[in-house]
Image (cartoon, helix red, strand yellow):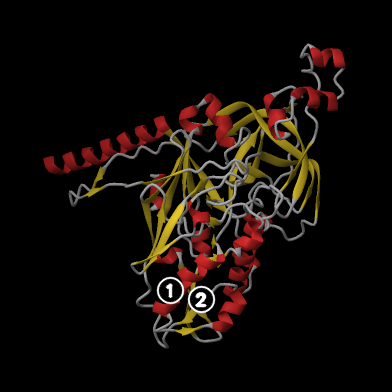
Amino acid sequence: MASSVLFLLTIFFTFLSLQSSLSNSAILLPLSHSLSTTSFNTTHHLLKSTATRSASRFRRHRSRVSLPLSPGADYTLSFSIGAQTISLYMDTGSDVVWLPCHPFECILCEGKYSPSAVSHPGPLNLTSASPTSCNSAACSAVHSSLPSSDLCAMAECPLESIEIDECNPFHCPPFYYAYGDGSFVAKLYQDTLSFRAAAPPLELPKFTFGCAKSALGEPIGVAGFGRGLLSLPAQLARSSPEIGNYFSYCLISHSFDADRVRQPSPLILGRYEEKIKKDITTTTTNVVYYSYTPMLNNPKHSYFYCVGLEAASVGGRRIPAPASLRRVDRRGNGGMVVDSGTTFTMLPRKFYKSVVGEFDRRVGAVFRRANAVEERTGLSPCYYGKEGEKVFTGVPQLVLHFGGNSSVVMPRMNYFYEFSDAAAKRVVGCVMLLDGGDEAEGGGGPAGLLGNYQQQGFEVVYDLEEKRVGFARRKCASMWG
């Protein structure tokens, strides 16, 4: 009897200790996957659409014009502006928070998202927001660091007021913001941002955001989590540095399964200080190990979280990455972007061919190539499983080696997708990496991109104080407590 009471008390105080540690140092928020599987009639269609969008988001950025990545359309984050709630795409590849405001006109936006998959798409009615002044730091930041004097002149502030810095009543001029495949025009406003679903609820007064009344191909706003003065983490850091300067997310592994896609993934603002937990029944200890890699400075694309990829190992064979993936040059070209808004990982063509070539050398010796599936999905290489068998055997392990002696072992489901092919009446497996194109023809920009599909099942940490990105294998659903 005494041992039973002690057992229950131990569980109780362990739970209280974990909850106290979490509530004092971090805030957990749900990320919802915006994919609506009802929009796709076959697995092949779903994969083809997702692969095409990933390639478009990456390749259109590799142009001679410095543009942010196209807004990610996989995970949404809901919060309140004033008294109204809205859902925006959470995107580490963007550095501005913007939302559609009433009346809102969106050009070429038909079929861009599934209303059933985005809980609060907007547009918002601004009832309590106030315009941002032309002489504010936020106005200068959103206008590519133009001097306040120029911006206030555009806002028609009188010359004598500009000279004595008394243009507060004059509003920041509208700004134009272009992505790789869309754009919008917006004005800056301030209002109270609140996460009512957080425990405890979090409020941020005078939060600055863009209010767009016209957009091209962008029906849903974006919560930019990139490295910029107006990103959501940067604004949080000004009042709560322990929250804004350190955030992470843990994407639940879904493999496009409809039930798993609907499970919310935790976004953690602040440090999830989970103590070393001991399994009371087995007395074993489960320690969470983080593998950190330094962020690379990018003089041209400062809003990206760039890291260096040194090599990839396939089944134990280490394949060195090109110099363009290992570092960023003085023109801002190179490096690998860690991105929450792109589904699949993109690698420069020569390196991609080396990686999948080694994969094909091992898997292709046992399984027949599924060329018809490759054409229908946009993925390659794909293989037919053996008749009567439901799983593949002998799939080699993939390890990514980042700068700072950081190696991340990929779970098999993160790079090899297995599904049933009705036409062939057998299982099919495809490598979930994409060809990022020829670097010589790309026009500059990042050399590669780590997509969110490869980030599933990891807590991905963005430590802005130490300027590093970390990875830790997690059971993401269990982080809800």
Task: Name the one closer to the observer, 423 or 159.
Answer: 159
Q: Secondary structure at mark 2?
A: loop
Say few, some or many: other residues with alpha carbon within 10 Å of mark 1 (under 14 / 14 to 19 / 20 or more): many
Vertical position of residue 182 compared to residue 129: above or below: below
Return the residue nearer the eye: 328 or 67: 328
Is residue 417 visible in the rendered structure shown here?
no
Horizontal side, residue 343 vs residue 144: left or right: left
Q: Position of residue 337 (x, y in %)?
A: 54, 51
Crowd band around label 2 with a 10 angstrom C-alpha radius: few (<14), some (14–19), many (20+):
many
Q: Please, what is the three-letter code of the amino acid marked with disc 2? A: Pro
Which residue is located at x 30 percent, y 34 percent? 17
The kind of residue tagged 1 is Phe
Q: Is residue 205 above or below residue 174?
A: above
The picture places residue 373, in percent across and down from the top left corner, at 56, 80
Residue position for label 2: 381
Frontmost residue, 363 versus 430: 363
Label 2 with label 1: CB-CB less than 8 Å: yes
The percent position of residue 253, horizontal first and vertical second, equals 45, 59
300 sits to left or right of 133 = left
**How many angstroms separate mark 2 from mark 1 (CA)?**
9 Å
Residue holding disc 1: 359
Quarter where residue 211 is shown: top right
